[in-house]
Amino acid sequence: MNLKNNIISFAALILIFILGSCDRDRNSTGWQYFDDMAQSPAYETYSPNPNFADGKTMRNPVEGTIPLGYEPYLYEKNDTDRVEAGLALVNPYESNAKNLERGKQVYNVYCTSCHAEKGDGKGFLFTSGKYPFPPKTLLSDKIRNAPEGEIYHVVTVGFGVMPQHGSQVRPEDRWKVAMYVKEVLHKQ
């Protein structure tokens, strides 16, 4: 009799557990044991945040952090490193129609607003008066004679007032833009 009572008690306990864990409206997972974990306070990217000494929510990545798929770039934004990068860096991609087409696509997205579709430096930002400094022409002998590694460097870290695009454009696409500038823009 004792075994039968234990089985009935165990079955009743399981039935209570199953029925107690069901949710009637299907919009909840059921019981919340740690309310602050289920309903954590969220902060918008640019909103104040009392959890940090500077009061900002958006944090800079830890110094030295490298995004997945990227390699550290050892050259800085100065003339010496630009020339060194031009001599040391070699485009690992073959010059073919597919790579040149990709270079053109990326150029049209990131470069035409300043340098224009033809590369003459008469892009919309300058011709509309929204940007006061005339962008460099990419058709000059200086660019024509520059190695692709130098163009890659300028796209990566910027040059003069030109901002860097290394955080926006993947390394392989930067090489394809350099290839496009050297092989297509100069032949138009």
Image (tube, rainbow, N blue to C red):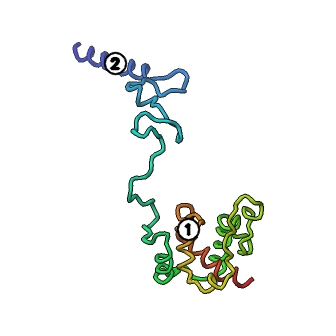
Question: Relative to residue 68, is residue 44 drawn left or right?
Answer: right
- Of mark 2 and mark 1, the one earlier in the sequence is 2
Residue bearing mark 2: 13
Which tag is nearer the camera, tag 2 or tag 1?
1
Residue 76 percent coordinates (x, y): 46, 69
Residue bearing mark 1: 158
Q: Residue 61 has which mark?
A: none
Image mark count: 2
Tell whether label 1 touches label 2 (CB within 8 Å).
Answer: no
Q: Nearer the viewer, residue 3 or 19?
A: 19
Rendering quarter of residue 40: top left
Question: Quick one: quadrant of the N terminus?
Answer: top left
Kind of residue at badge 2? Leu
Residue 49, placed above or below residue 11: below
| Residue at image point 45% right, 59% down | 67
- Marks 2/1: CA–CA distance: 69 Å
Q: Residues within 10 Å of mark 1 (few under 14, many from 20)?
A: some
Question: Relative to residue 98, is residue 42 drawn left or right?
Answer: left
| Residue at image point 70% right, 64% down | 113
Kind of residue at badge 1? Gly
Residue 10 percent coordinates (x, y): 30, 20
Residue 144, placed above or below residue 17: below
Residue 48, placed above or below residue 9: below
Q: Residue furthest front?
A: 132
Q: Residue furthest left?
A: 2
Q: Nearer the viewer, residue 160 or 56?
A: 160
Residue 75 percent coordinates (x, y): 45, 72
| Residue at image point 60% right, 76% down | 178
Mark 2 element type: helix
